[in-house]
Structure formats: structure tokens, C-alpha cells
Amino acid sequence: MKRIILACLFAIAPAVASAIPVDYDVAYTATAGPSGVGSLTWDASAKSMTGLAWDFGSGRVGGVVDSSLAQTLGGGTFGAMAWEMITGEDVYPSLLISVQFNGFPPLTAGTTFPSGAIPGIQFLAGGNYLFRDISNNQTQSQGTVSVRARADTPTPVPEPTSLALLALGLAVALVSCTTRRAAAPVRA
């Protein structure tokens, strides 16, 4: 009986996850060129990113098309690549050095750049970025990138599977204690 319960416990364990994607503010802190701000949404349970956007001022605004972030390569998505480069959290299955988004798509149609240049953004290991005009490979801004969860983002709530897993664990503990007491010899 115990083995069946433990097998069930291990079978449903991978289904435990948070149910709410989290919105983040992004800060691009420049070491050269202008600093910028932006936003993104990260869903840790699905390892997916949406809404990656930026504003470096002076007409340098834009973002990455969600369908480009969802494209897969090497067992993960481009969004997971970007998240790993920005945060250092190991969410992409392969070793990464950088991920780059250039032109249209993957950049949103609303992406603008002074003088009609072609924008591109590259996220590098260690939380660094390069924002540049890819038509002439001229860097417009470079530095570090960081994220901060928005204060108005709801706290992730465990899915029902997590609660079922907890209940199953308590049931196993109860059965185990009851079985030991029943098997113990009675002292006179």
C-alpha cells in the first residue's frame, strides 16, 4: 500500500507549479549611450516570456514580437534564452552566450529608431545588453540589464495539484504512523 501511495506521489510531483505569470519592470543601465526602461512578463511554470519592450529615449522605442519569443530552438524558446541572459536563472536547456533580436520581425512594427536605422538588441551572459543600429553595426547603448517584479503583480498561488500533493503526503504520514502503532506489541 505504501509503495502505491509513494508511486502516486512521484507521478504527480512534476505537475507542481505557480499559476500566475509575473510582470517585471526592466532597467537598462548604460555604461555607454543612454539608459533605458522597459517591461516584460515571465511565466516560470511554462518558461515563456511575452511583452518584452524598451524605451531608450530620443525615438528609440520598441519590443520583440511575442511569436518570436515563443519560437523554439534547441529544446527551449527564445524568450527562455532572453530570461536566462537577463537574470542568470538556468531555464534554457543548452549553454548560452547571447541571444539577439534584429529587424522586423522579430521586433514589433512599432519599434522606432532615429534616421530610419534598423534596430537590434542583444542580451549577453551576465546580464549585459547591446542596443544597436544593425545596418552599420553601430552601438547606440550598452550596459547591464536587470528586472524587478512590479508591486501590483499578484503573488503566485499554488495550483490544485500542489495542494493534492500536500494532502497525499499527509495521508502517507498518517498511514505510516497508524501501521506502526497497530504492529507494536502491547505491554502488560
Image (spheres, rainbow, N blue to C red):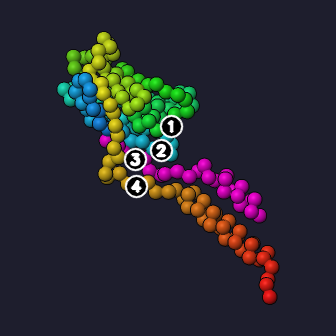
- The magenta stretch is 1-25
SS type, badge 3: strand
Which residue has dot 1 on it?
91
Residue 101 location in percent, x, y?
A: 39, 24
Amino acid type of the residue that numbered disc 4 sits on in the rendered structure: Thr
Q: Are the residues at dot 2 and dot 3 in contact (C-beta closer than 8 Å)?
A: yes
Q: Residues within 10 Å of mark 2 (few under 14, many from 20)?
A: some
Instruction: Please give left or right for residue 152 compared with residue 90 in the image.
Output: left
SS type, badge 1: loop
Q: Are the residues at dot 2 and dot 1 in contact (C-beta closer than 8 Å)?
A: yes
Of badges 2 and 1, the one in the foreground is 1
- In which quadrant will I find the N terminus? bottom right
Instruction: Please give left or right for residue 2 compared with residue 164 in the image.
Output: right
Does residue 73 appear in this view?
yes
Front residue of this view, candidates 94 and 40: 94
Of labels 4 and 3, earlier in sequence is 3
Which residue has dot 4 on it?
155
Image disc number at residue 44: 2
Of labels 4 and 2, earlier in sequence is 2
Asked if residue 188 lies in the magenta stretch, the reply is: no
Residue 21 location in percent, x, y?
A: 43, 47
Does residue 110 appear in this view?
no
Q: Is residue 12 above or below residue 103?
A: below
Of badges 3 and 1, the one in the foreground is 1
Amino acid type of the residue that numbered disc 3 sits on in the rendered structure: Val
Q: CA distance from mark 2 to mark 3?
A: 8 Å
Of labels 2 and 3, earlier in sequence is 3
Image disc number at residue 22: 3
